[in-house]
Amino acid sequence: MNRMAESVADPRRAQRLAYGYACAAGMLTAIFLLRIPIQLSDSFSEFLAMQGRSLYRVVRDEFSGGPYLRPLRRGLIKILFDLSGGHYYAWFRGFHALELIVLFVLVVRMFRVRSLADAAAVPLLLAMIVGLHTFNDVVREAFPINHFLTIAICCVAAVNLSQSPGGLLVDLSAVALLAFAMLTIESGLLVWVVFVAAYIGGYRGISRRALIALTATLGFYFVLRFVVLGGTVPAINERDTGFGLAAANPDELTRLFGGRLWPFYAYNVVSAMSCVLFAEPRSGTWIFVRGALNHDLQPWQILGVLTSTLTTLLIARYIAKRFRRFRRLDLDHDDRLVLLFVALLPANAAFAAVYAKDVILSPAGIFYAVAAAVVLRHLLFEEIAARHTAIRAAAFAVALVIAFGWTIRAVGIHYRLREVAAIDRDDWAYYDRWERQQGDQVTTPADKQLWQTLYDDAIWKRSQPPMIDSRVANAWSDPLE
Amino acid sequence: MKTAVLILVVPPLAGFIAVGGFLLAEAAGARPLSAEPANISEAAAIGAAARAIQLIVNGENPNRPWPIREGVLGSASYSVDAIDAAILGRRPEIIEVLMKHGARVTDAPRSACLIRAVDLPELLPIVGASSDRVTSDASEHSSDRIRACLE
């Protein structure tokens, strides 16, 4: 350990700094989330579906087979819907903001701050999470609860449980967490991957018995979904998806691949991993390559690919240097966090096999940021301390580029969230047009009352933040499309 | 090791302070990077429907001309009512919202001329003309045609 890390007699000071910053950064982004009204698209229909139905019926109706099994997604919406007592904005937008802060705190806990060197990496770690392109839709969207954020929290909570001293309560919590995540959306299955990878890596908070119970729970899920309920896997004919240099519709995909879809699935999985590692392709479309070919690269594209690629190279270098330790599973805490990312990446990418969308990869993105913070901390505080001045200068320069790059990405997200606030408000003003496109939505007096409440919230009750526009910010921030 | 700490901490902390400072400045009444429409015509021109509704309900008359500042719709400035502003801004979707809140076509020939100038023939029915009567001269520049309509 270096001198600075050892000089901190009381690790609690470093922890207080780290948690304090996590809360402050979470609250700052939360303010931007709270300026966004409840969305018309994706949210209003969900609200209408909650009217006049009991929680039991909402959940039960989701056990109907088909390509998805997400009873607790709607169950959670229903619980919040009923608890809100008509104050939908406060409860749903507040829940989104609260989830973000909880995620930040759990990430810092998972990072295990023990010294000032650890604490120093926390601001960049959180900037990387917010600045990640896979995190865009986690803050931009709500359906009306962002279940991708919920699953990301579950994955990080799984690591926290694995790092704990363990015990019966921890084991039971682990099984409950997995069951909750799996029944929320499909990518909740990643929680099982996290538990297993954490155990293999050496965390013993979850007992071997619990691991068997978790695996049995996973097996039960598949039996329930595919045998008992007769469910199917999602088909490619549901929506457009990125392929090559543009988006492709289901007809085009069918023409391209016919009945042999494995190459398409493989393309999506590889693209998804590349998306996390290199910020390209985005949602299956190679926009950076397209921009380069058309001589139309935008600054935000260059920034994204450059920072992600540099960061990935550092992680790859770390793994290469410690490859023997990784192979023997002779891992310390830092190695385990990197191993978790390595294990989660392909598993998470598999969920994008049918439909490429960046936000599906949000759990892998968060673990990527944690691995990157581990590697940067290791590089700057341990590895180069005794190295030649030129090597140190080079390492500092790379770290500085990475730190500034991710900071610009994180700041850019806040700029775009302000834009989103105006867009989502305007959607309510354009309600008539939306209803014509969607078909009649508001049919009963209760529906009308619900619409009026949400409309008033969006247009009148919440102070609309000033619209902003900046040529520089437009050029350097990811447009959240 | 101080350098290492500075490298890790300073950039994200600077970002945090910049974003937080921006919010504080707004809370104090400053308007950094503001793109707020100054009136109903500017709101219509940029398609800011929610703001347009607020302005109308709060008393702004959408049927009188309001100035559109230079920079809102390119380098030119205009003085037009809300419907014409929506046409100039090529925001056909906001016209229905404006009309629902009391806006109307105040000068049908001028609006029709603007519709042709910006090449949005689907809007001709709002001025009582059919959409097959577009006769704009393609060789003439759009801004010249707009200017001619407003003279």
Image: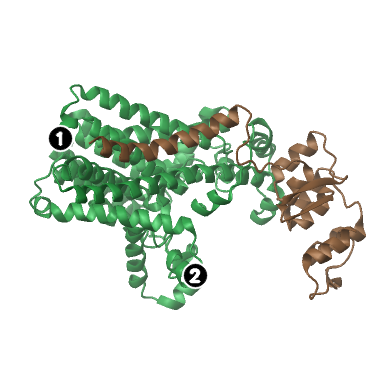
Chain colours: A green, B brown
Number of residues whose C-alpha sits closer than 10 Å to that of mark 1, classed few (under 14), some (14–19) or many (20 or more): few
Left/right of residue B62 with respect to residue A22 in the rendered view: right
Q: Quadrant of the N terminus of chain A?
A: top left
Q: Which of marks 2 and 1 is nearer the N terminus?
A: 1
> Considering depth in this image, is A324 or A438 the residue closer to the camera?
A324
What's the CA distance linking mark 2 and mark 1? 47 Å
Q: Name the residue under label 2.
A: A295
Q: Position of residue A306 (x, y in %)?
A: 37, 57
> Which structural element holds mark 2?
loop
Q: Name the residue under label 1.
A: A2
Say which of A267 and A332 sits in front.
Answer: A332
| Residue A320 vertical position relative to residue A104 in the rendered view, above or below | below
Disc 1 sits on a residue from what chain? A
Q: In which quarter of the image is residue B138?
A: bottom right
Q: Quadrant of residue B73?
A: bottom right
Residue at 34%, 40% in the rendered image:
A124
Going by the numbered disc 2, the residue's amino acid type is His
Identify the residue at horizontal 49%, vertical 70% (top origin): A295
Determine the image quadrant of residue B36.
top right
Query: Which residue corresponds to the image point at 26% horizontal and 37% vertical from the top-left?
Result: A111
Three-letter amino acid code at the position of disc 1: Asn
